[in-house]
C-alpha cells in the first residue's frame, strides 16, 4: 500500500510516497535520485548497496522503507567533499570498474568512525562482506589505512 | 603509414574536434570497461597534440559519430586504437601548425599546451579552431613524435573516471534516468531450453503501476512505472508460471568423459615435425570448469522506439556490432547505440542480450525508454559462461631427460558466440520467442586473430617436434562465450603445470629457460625469479610463465601459498613486459586485478548445475575471492620504450593459475590437475 514517509537522508529531511515494503535502495536511487548507492544482487550478499544507518553499515537492497523511518540514513553522496577516504581512494587509484566502490567507501566510513586507526586485518574484516570483481582490493585496503592515519 | 582503424575512418574530424574555448573532444572506437583504456588513449593523443590532459574529453562511443574500431576485446585496444590516435594527433597538430605558419608568416614555431609561438607572434589551437578544416582524410605523412620526447606517455596519469566512481556520481547505464523512462524486467525460464506451458498474468497486473506485460512464446517481460514494481511484478509472474523442463545438461561429476565423448570438430593448430628418439612418454590431463563473468553489476540496457527508429544505451563491448545485429533482428529503419559504462565485463557477458531484452519490451511502449536490469540469478546463470575444457598433454623425453616432442590436445566448446559471429544475431531471447531461433553452437576465431580454445596452446618453449590440436564440441548444453583470456587460462595452466612435472629434480626456472629462446621471455622469467627471491624460496612456492596469446604481453608469476587441505595464496609476484608502457600505474592496476581475479577462479570458482538447472545463481553458491583471502601482489614492469604496446589486460590469468598449482604441489607434493583447487579436488588428487 502506498503511503507517505518522512526520512532523514544525509542530514536532510525528505518525503517519499511509495509502498512501505519498497527496498531502501530503490527509494534512494529512483525516488530521491541518489544514484551512488548501487544494485548488485538484491540479496544482501555483495555490498554494492551499502549505506550507513545510525552508524552501522547495512545493505539497502533488502532493507524495507518502513524500517528506516526516523533513522539517520547516510549515503556516499553525503560524505564531505574533503573526506580523507575519498581523497585516498583517488590517490591510490583504488578502483577499476568502480561499481563496488561506493558501497566499499561506506563500509570503510563506518569502520573509521568506530575504530579510528584500524590495522590491515581490521580493514579486511570490515570489508569482507563487500565483493570486488576487478581485483582492486589491495589498493582499497591501502586507501582505507591511509585515510585512518 | 596509416594504422588500420584510421584507414577505415580516415576523416580526422570523425576523431577530433577542437573547441574555441580551449578543449578538445576525442572520439575513438574503444570503450571504457573499467580497464582505464580511455585514460591511456587520452595520454597518447594529448602527447601528439602537445596539450595537457585536462584539455581532452574522451567521448564515449555512439554509432554513427564515433569511428568503428570493432570490439573492445582481446587486450588489443592499445595495440589497435593507440597507433590510430597517435597518427590522428600528429596529423591534426600538423594542420594547425601549417595554419599558424601561414598566419604568422614563419615555419619556426613552438607549441606548448595548444599555444603556438614564434618570433613574429603567437596564436593557438583555440584561436585557429574555426579556421582549420579537419574534415580531411589522414595522409600518413606527418610523423608522430619520437618516444624520447614523450612527456605525458609513460607517466601514471590519474584515471579520468575514478573520482566520479569514488564519489558516487551517476556514470553507469544503470544510473541513467531518461525522461519518461519505464522499468522493465524479464522472467527467464528456470532452465536452459525450458518451454512456458502456462502463465497467469493477473496477480502481476494487479500491481498499481504496472504498464504492460509482454509475452512472446517463452519470453516474458514486465514494464512498470517504478523499478520496485517491475521487480515485484517479475516475481509474481515467475511464481505464476509453469514450465516444461528437460534434463539437457551433462553430469557435472564426469565432465572429463563428457568433453571427450561429445561429437567434435578436430583441427590441427600447429605441427612441427622432426626425427626424434624418445625413451619414454609422459601423459597428463588438465581440466577447468565452466566459469561465470560474475560482474558486480548485473547486465543493463535502455531501449527506446520512435516509430521504426531504435535508440539503445548499452555497456556492450562493441557498439557497432550491437547496432548491426539489432538492425538485423528487428528490421528497424535506423538503430543508434550509445555506449554507457557498466561494471567490469571480463568478456562477452549479458550486455548484448539485455539490450535485446530492452528492445523487445520497449516495443510495447513506443516513444518511452525502457530500462532493463537483469537479476543477480539471471546474471550468474544466463549470461554466457567461459567453457569447461580439458587438455591432454604428452611429452616424449630422450635418454638425457630432454623434452623432444610435445602433444597438446584440447576438448571443449568454442569460446565465442557473440552477436555478429553467426548468420543470425544470437541474442539470448531469440531462442525463447514464439518463433525461436536456437542459439548457435559457439566457435573459435582463427589463430591469427588470437584463437579461442587454442589461445596460447602452441608452446613458447622450443621443442624439436610438436602437435597442437583442438576438438570443438558440436553440441552446447550450456551457452559459452569469451571470458577474459579465453582458452589461454587452461592452456597455460596445463602447459606450465606439466613443465613442472617434467622438470623432475631440475629447478623449474632452470628447466624452463632450457627451452625458452625469446630474449624478452627469458628476461621476464629472470625478473620474476629475482624479485621473489626464487633462489632462496620457502616451501610452497611455484613458478609459471606465458606470453599472452603468443603475441601480447609477457608475464611470469611466482606464487607463495599455504596449504593443508585448503589453499591460501599469500603472495603473488609478477614480472610483465607489455612493450612500451603508456601508463605504469594503469598497467599495474590491470596486472594486479588480473592476478587477483585468476586467484579467485583458480581457488574457488565453478558453475554448478544438476542435469536440468544451473544451481550457482547467487554469491553463496558461486563464491568469489573476498578481501580477507586476497593475496599480496607485487608487480615488476619491464618497460620497452619505443616498442609497440603489447596487450596486458589478460596476460596474468593463465600463469597465475599455474604458479598457484605449482606452489601447491611444492607445499603438499600433490599435483592437482582439476580446477578449481578446492579442498575436494586437492583431496581427490592425493595418492
Image: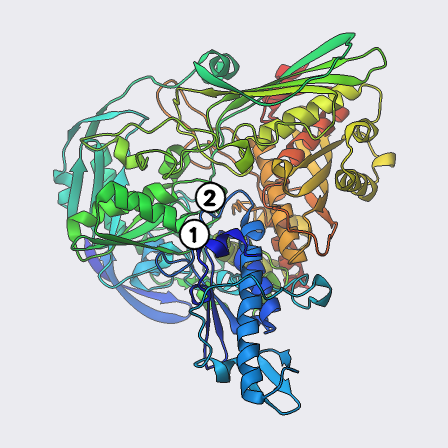
Chain for numbered disc 2 = B
What residue is disc 2 on? B295
Task: Provide the residue designation for mark 1.
Answer: B342
Disc 1 packing (10 Å; few <14; some 14–19; many ≥20):
many
Residue B357 visible in this rendered orientation of the protein: no
Residue B615, compared with residue B60, is above or below; it is: above
- Residue A12 location, quadrant: bottom left
Mark 1 or 2, nearer chain start: 2
Q: Which residue does the image show at 72% across and 48% down from the upper left? A: B635
Residue B18 shows in this picture: yes
- What is the number of the mark on residue B36? none
Position of residue B85 measured from the top left corner of the image (x, y, whole percent) = 54, 61
For image coordinates 28% across by 62% down, the residue present is: B178
SS at circle 1: loop
Nearer-the-camera pick, B602 or B402: B402
| CB-based contact (under 8 Å), mark 1 and mark 2 | yes
Label 2: state its secondary structure: loop
Say yes or no: labels 1 and 2 on the same chain.
yes
| Residue B1, percent from left and from top | 58, 56
Amino acid at each position: 500500500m502506498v503511503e507517505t514517509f518522512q526520512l532523514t537522508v544525509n542530514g536532510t529531511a525528505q518525503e517519499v510516497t511509495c509502498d512501505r515494503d519498497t527496498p531502501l535502495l530503490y527509494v534512494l536511487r529512483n525516488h530521491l535520485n541518489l544514484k551512488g548507492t548501487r544494485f548488485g544482487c538484491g540479496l544482501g550478499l555483495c555490498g554494492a548497496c551499502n549505506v550507513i544507518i545510525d552508524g552501522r553499515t547495512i545493505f539497502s537492497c533488502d532493507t524495507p522503507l518502513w524500517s528506516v523511518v526516523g533513522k539517520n540514513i547516510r549515503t556516499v553522496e553525503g560524505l564531505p567533499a574533503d573526506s580523507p577516504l575519498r581523497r585516498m581512494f583517488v590517490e591510490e587509484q583504488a578502483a577499476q570498474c568502480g561499481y563496488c566502490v561506493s558501497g566499499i567507501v561506506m563500509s570503510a566510513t563506518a569502520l573509521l568512525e568506530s575504530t579510528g586507526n584500524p590495522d590491515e586485518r581490521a580493514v579486511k574484516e570490515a570489508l569482507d562482506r563487500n565483493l570486488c570483481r576487478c581485483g582492486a582490493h589491495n589498493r582499497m585496503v591501502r586507501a582505507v589505512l591511509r585515510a585512518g592515519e | 603509414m596509416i594504422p588500420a582503424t584510421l584507414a577505415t575512418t580516415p576523416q580526422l574530424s570523425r576523431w577530433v574536434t577542437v573547441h574555441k574555448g580551449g578543449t578538445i573532444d576525442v572520439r575513438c572506437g574503444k570503450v571504457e570497461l573499467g580497464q582505464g583504456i580511455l585514460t591511456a588513449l587520452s595520454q597518447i593523443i594529448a602527447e601528439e597534440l602537445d596539450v595537457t590532459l585536462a584539455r581532452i574529453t574522451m567521448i564515449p562511443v555512439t554509432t554513427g559519430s564515433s569511428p568503428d574500431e570493432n570490439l573492445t576485446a582481446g587486450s588489443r585496444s592499445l595495440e589497435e586504437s593507440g597507433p590510430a590516435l597517435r597518427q590522428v594527433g600528429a596529423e591534426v597538430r600538423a594542420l594547425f601548425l601549417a595554419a599558424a605558419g601561414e598566419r604568422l608568416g614563419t615555419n619556426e614555431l613552438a607549441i606548448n599546451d595548444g599555444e603556438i609561438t614564434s618570433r613574429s607572434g603567437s596564436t593557438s589551437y583555440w584561436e585557429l579552431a574555426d579556421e582549420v578544416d579537419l574534415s580531411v582524410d589522414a595522409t600518413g605523412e606527418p610523423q608522430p613524435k619520437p618516444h624520447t620526447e614523450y612527456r605525458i606517455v609513460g607517466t601514471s596519469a590519474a584515471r579520468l573516471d575514478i573520482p566520479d566512481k569514488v564519489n558516487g556520481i551517476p556514470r553507469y547505464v544503470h544510473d541513467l534516468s531518461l525522461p519518461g523512462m519505464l522499468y522493465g524486467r524479464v522472467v527467464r525460464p528456470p532452465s536452459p531450453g525450458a518451454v512456458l506451458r502456462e502463465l497467469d498474468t493477473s496477480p502481476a497486473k494487479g500491481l498499481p503501476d504496472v504498464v504492460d506485460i509482454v509475452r512472446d512464446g517463452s519470453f516474458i517481460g514486465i514494464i512498470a512505472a517504478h523499478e520496485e514494481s517491475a521487480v515485484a511484478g517479475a516475481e509474481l509472474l515467475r511464481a505464476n508460471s509453469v514450465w516444461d523442463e528437460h534434463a539437457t545438461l551433462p553430469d557435472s561429476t564426469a565432465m572429463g568423459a563428457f568433453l571427450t565423448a561429445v561429437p567434435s570438430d578436430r583441427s590441427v593448430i600447429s605441427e612441427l615435425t622432426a626425427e626424434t628418439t624418445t625413451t619414454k612418454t609422459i601423459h597428463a590431463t588438465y581440466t577447468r570448469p565452466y566459469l561465470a563473468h560474475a560482474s558486480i553489476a548485473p547486465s543493463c540496457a535502455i531501449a527506446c522506439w520512435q516509430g521504426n527508429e531504435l535508440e539503445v544505451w548499452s555497456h556492450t563491448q562493441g557498439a557497432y556490432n550491437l547496432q548491426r545485429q539489432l538492425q538485423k533482428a528487428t528490421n528497424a529503419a535506423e538503430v543508434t547505440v550509445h555506449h554507457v559504462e557498466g561494471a567490469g565485463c571480463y568478456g562477452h557477458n549479458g550486455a548484448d542480450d539485455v539490450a535485446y531484452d530492452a528492445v523487445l519490451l520497449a516495443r510495447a511502449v513506443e516513444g518511452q525508454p525502457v530500462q532493463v536490469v537483469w537479476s543477480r540469478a539471471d546474471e550468474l546463470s544466463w549470461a554466457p559462461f567461459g567453457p569447461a575444457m580439458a587438455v591432454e598433454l604428452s611429452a616424449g623425453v630422450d635418454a638425457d631427460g630432454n623434452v623432444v616432442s610435445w602433444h597438446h590436445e584440447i576438448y571443449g566448446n568454442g569460446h565465442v558466440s557473440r552477436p555478429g559471429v553467426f548468420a543470425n544475431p544470437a541474442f539470448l531471447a531469440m531462442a525463447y520467442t514464439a518463433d525461436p531461433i536456437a542459439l548457435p553452437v559457439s566457435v573459435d576465431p582463427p589463430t591469427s586473430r588470437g584463437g579461442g580454445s587454442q589461445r596460447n596452446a602452441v608452446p613458447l618453449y622450443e621443442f624439436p617436434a610438436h602437435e597442437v590440436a583442438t576438438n570443438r564440441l558440436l553440441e552446447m548444453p550450456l551457452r559459452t562465450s569469451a571470458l577474459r583470456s579465453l582458452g589461454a587460462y587452461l592452456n597455460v595452466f596445463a602447459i606450465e603445470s606439466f613443465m613442472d612435472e617434467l622438470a623432475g629434480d631440475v629447478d623449474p626456472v632452470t628447466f624452463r629457460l632450457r627451452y625458452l629462446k625469446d630474449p624478452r621471455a627469458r628476461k621476464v622469467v629472470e625478473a620474476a625469479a629475482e624479485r621473489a627471491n626464487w633462489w632462496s624460496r620457502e616451501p610452497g612456492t611455484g613458478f609459471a610463465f606465458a606470453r599472452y596469446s603468443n603475441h601480447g604481453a609477457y608475464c611470469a608469476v611466482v606464487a607463495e601459498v599455504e596449504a593443508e587441505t585448503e589453499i591460501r595464496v599469500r603472495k603473488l609476484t609478477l614480472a610483465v613486459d607489455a612493450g612500451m608502457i603508456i601508463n605504469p600505474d594503469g598497467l599495474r592496476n590491470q596486472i594486479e586485478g588480473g592476478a587477483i581475479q585468476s586467484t579467485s577462479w583458480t581457488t574457488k570458482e565453478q558453475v554448478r548445475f544438476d542435469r536440468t538447472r544451473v544451481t550457482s545463481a547467487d554469491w553463496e553458491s558461486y563464491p568469489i575471492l573476498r578481501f580477507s583471502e586476497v593475496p599480496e601482489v607485487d608487480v615488476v614492469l619491464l618497460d620497452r620504450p619505443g616498442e609497440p604496446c603489447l596487450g596486458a589486460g589478460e596476460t596474468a590469468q593463465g600463469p597465475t593459475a599455474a604458479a598457484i598449482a605449482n606452489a601447491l604441489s611444492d607445499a603438499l607434493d600433490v599435483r592437482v590437475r582439476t580446477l578449481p583447487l578446492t579442498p575436494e579436488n586437492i583431496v581427490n588428487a592425493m595418492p
